[in-house]
Image (cartoon, rainbow, N blue to C red):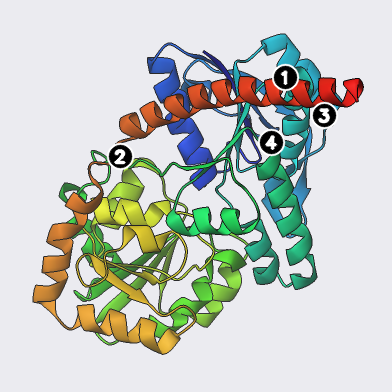
């Protein structure tokens, strides 16, 4: 097949959307498929070696005010129609579509190319976190419009499936995320790393992710001063200065990737994620693969990942006293923490990227068949209207 993959964000920005896209490019290349990536242009060009043979169409973009790492693409459906016509894909993959994805969806529709929309970002929820709740309903309508128009939408969790269903999306299937269980593994735990981060031998409570409002990292202040522990925060973003001021005793390590990230996660004693707007939460899955028990909010993607009282705890959303109590429970019970850790890896290790890549190819094929059916139905309605 020939697949055009349209991404709202792309390298050098690294997040869950970009990470899963790179994994799919690798798998599609290995399976002999041809790919084109359409994405915003950054000042720094992406490393072609990580594109796995994909063609690349980078479009003019502008920095988001207050968050310059996030780019907004400035283009039109007409421009994208030309790009898609030249590449002639069998299917268009829309990664977390919103602005660029909407224009690409319109372009694909004009050419009769089926689309697979990957739901990965709770944009209406982000509006609340960024202090613009007046836009929540507008964003929800736009998300609904995109996913009702796409040939097929794939959602990563039961929570996101329910959310999209409530917005009237019917051509909807479940597609989770894989995890690299070779990279993220208990064997990557490093005593030297632990000694450098917590020289007093404290237990290490870790978080990995963007330091941005939607991640609710400020909630970690509730556990930042637990005796005998060191809070370690991996990641970067616009909230870092404020977070460093609010949690002066926490270790802020900045962005880590590759083996450095794998070593850090495996060296945690406990992983905590407070974000309530996660459609999946890949870092939780990577922590579990590393044999690290997790405490996460009982909302969104973590509901499908954390087996409460088996691989970690889910705390009541917004209840920071419950968050602290769940963390204290594991900090104060070495046997329970080890028992949760022993089960954690087995709960996700079977979710390989290869398996998820094969599933995605199957969804592409389903969308192609569905596209033909939808086109035939529209033609029939059009002919019926003319006859009437």
Residue ID for mark 3: 77
Callout 2: helix, strand or loop?
loop
Disc 2 packing (10 Å; few <14; some 14–19; many ≥20): many
Q: Please give the residue where the numbered disc 2 appears in the rendered image.
A: 180
Q: Mark 4 or mark 3: which is in front? A: 3
Disc nearest the viewer among 4 and 2:
2
The mark closer to the camera, 2 or 3, is 3
Q: CA distance from mark 2 to mark 3?
A: 36 Å
Of the residues under marks 1 and 2, which one precedes in the sequence?
Answer: 1
Q: Residue furthest front?
A: 388
Percent x, y of residue 371? 63, 24
Residue farthest to the left, as pictured: 335
Between the C-alphas of marks 1 and 4, the distance is 30 Å
Q: Residues within 10 Å of mark 4 (few under 14, many from 20)?
A: many
Residue 218: x %, y % from top left:
52, 76
Q: CA distance from mark 4 to mark 2?
A: 27 Å
Instruction: Between residue 27 and residue 212, name the one nearer to us.
Output: 27
Q: Nearer the viewer, residue 365 or 301?
A: 365
**Which residue in the protein does label 4 denote?**
42
Along the line of sight, which residue is nearer the eye, 26 or 2? 2
Quarter-wise, where is residue 353 in the image?
A: top left
Q: Secondary structure at mark 1?
A: loop
């Amino acid at each position: 097949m020939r697949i055009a993959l349209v991404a709202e964000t792309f390298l050098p920005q690294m997040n869950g959307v970009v990470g899963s896209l790179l994994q799919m490019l690798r798998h599609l290349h290995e399976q002999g498929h041809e790919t084109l990536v359409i994405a915003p242009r950054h000042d720094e060009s992406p490393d072609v070696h990580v594109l796995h043979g994909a063609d690349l169409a980078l479009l003019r973009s502008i920095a988001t005010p207050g968050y310059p790492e996030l780019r907004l693409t400035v283009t039109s459906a007409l421009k994208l129609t030309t790009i898609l016509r030249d590449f002639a894909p069998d299917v268009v993959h829309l990664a977390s579509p919103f602005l660029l994805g909407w224009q690409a969806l319109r372009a694909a529709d004009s050419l009769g190319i089926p689309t697979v929309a990957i739901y990965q970002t709770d944009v209406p929820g982000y509006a609340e976190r960024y202090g613009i709740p007046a836009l929540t309903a507008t964003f929800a309508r736009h998300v609904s419009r995109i996913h009702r128009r796409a040939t097929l939408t794939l959602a990563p969790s039961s929570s996101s499936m329910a959310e999209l269903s409530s917005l009237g999306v019917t051509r909807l299937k479940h597609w989770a995320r894989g995890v690299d269980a070779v990279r993220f593994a208990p064997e990557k735990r490093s005593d030297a790393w632990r000694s450098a981060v917590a020289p007093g031998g404290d237990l290490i409570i870790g978080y990995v992710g963007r330091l941005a409002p939607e991640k609710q990292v400020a909630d970690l202040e509730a556990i930042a001063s637990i005796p005998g522990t060191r809070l370690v925060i991996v990641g970067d973003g616009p909230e870092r200065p404020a977070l460093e001021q609010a949690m002066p005793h926490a270790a802020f390590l900045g962005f880590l990737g590759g083996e450095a990230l794998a070593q850090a996660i495996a060296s945690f004693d406990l992983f905590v994620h407070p974000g309530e707007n996660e459609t999946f939460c890949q870092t939780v899955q990577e922590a579990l693969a590393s044999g690290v028990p997790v405490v996460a909010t009982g909302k969104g993607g973590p509901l499908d990942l954390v087996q409460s009282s088996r691989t970690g705890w889910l705390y009541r959303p917004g209840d920071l006293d419950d968050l602290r109590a769940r963390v204290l429970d594991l900090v104060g019970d070495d046997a329970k923490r080890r028992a949760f850790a022993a089960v954690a890896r087995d709960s996700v290790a079977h979710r390989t990227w290869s398996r998820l890549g094969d599933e995605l190819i199957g969804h592409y094929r389903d969308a192609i068949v569905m596209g033909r059916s939808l086109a035939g139905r529209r033609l029939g309605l059009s002919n019926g209207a003319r006859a009437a």
